[in-house]
Amino acid sequence: MHQHHKVNYIEMPSRDLNLSKAFFTKVFGWAFVDYGPEYCAFSNEGIDGGFYYADLAISSQSGAPLIVLYSNQLEATQSAVLAAGGELIKAIFSFPGGRRFQFKDPAGNEFAVWSE
């Protein structure tokens, strides 16, 4: 059920939709629905969203929001990200409330993964 004034959907650029879909399917188990050659959507992943084709990438260095995923096996997730072609930006580090790492997916978008 949609909630009034709550974040409902997120759209992110991808330089290569096939790379993005393959990466997020392999590492996080996401499933995608294609809507033409320049858009794909995912759902039931904490928030619904999609990737659109663009020669852009999200990066906290450029002021873009950092999308943070959760893992109950942080080291295993970091290893899976690297094995699937992700690039580590910051290895696992502690912060108040838990630990996390930051990475770029193969299309160049920055994400983080955290755990308690």
Image (tube, rainbow, N blue to C red):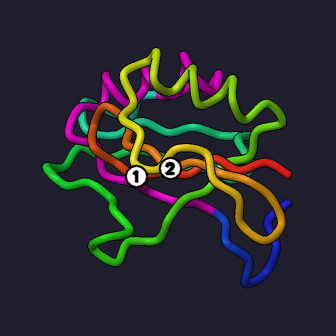
In whole angstroms, how far apart are the C-alphas of marks 1 and 2? Answer: 7 Å
Picture mark count: 2
Residue nearest the viewer, comparing 17 with 103: 103
Residue at 73% x, 84% y: name it.
5
Disc 1 vs disc 2: Cβ atoms closer than 8 Å?
yes
- 66 shown above or below 24: below
Mark 1, residues whose alpha carbon is within 10 Å: few (<14), some, or many (≥20)? many
The amino acid beneath tag 2 is: Gln
Residue at 79% x, 65% y: name it.
2
Residue nearest the viewer, comparing 69 with 82: 82
Q: Position of residue 73 (x, y in %)?
A: 79, 30
Specify the segment rendered in magenta: 9-33
Residue nearest the viewer, comparing 104 with 14: 104
Give the structural element (helix, strand or loop) at label 2: strand
Residue nearest the viewer, comparing 88 with 66: 88
Q: Nearer the viewer, mark 1 or mark 2?
A: 2
Q: Position of residue 101 (x, y in %)?
A: 57, 48
The answer to which quarter of the image holds residue 38 is top left
Q: Position of residue 1 (x, y in %)?
A: 86, 59
Mark 2, residues whose alpha carbon is within 10 Å: few (<14), some, or many (≥20)? many
The amino acid beneath tag 1 is: Glu
Q: Which disc is residue 102 wearing?
A: 2
- 38 shown above or below 11: above
Q: Which disc is residue 82 wearing?
A: none
What residue would you read off at disc 1?
Answer: 110
Report whether 48 appears left or right of 4.
left
Identify the residue at the far bottom of this view.
Answer: 5
Residue at 46% x, 71% y: name it.
65
Residue at 50% x, 64% y: name it.
66
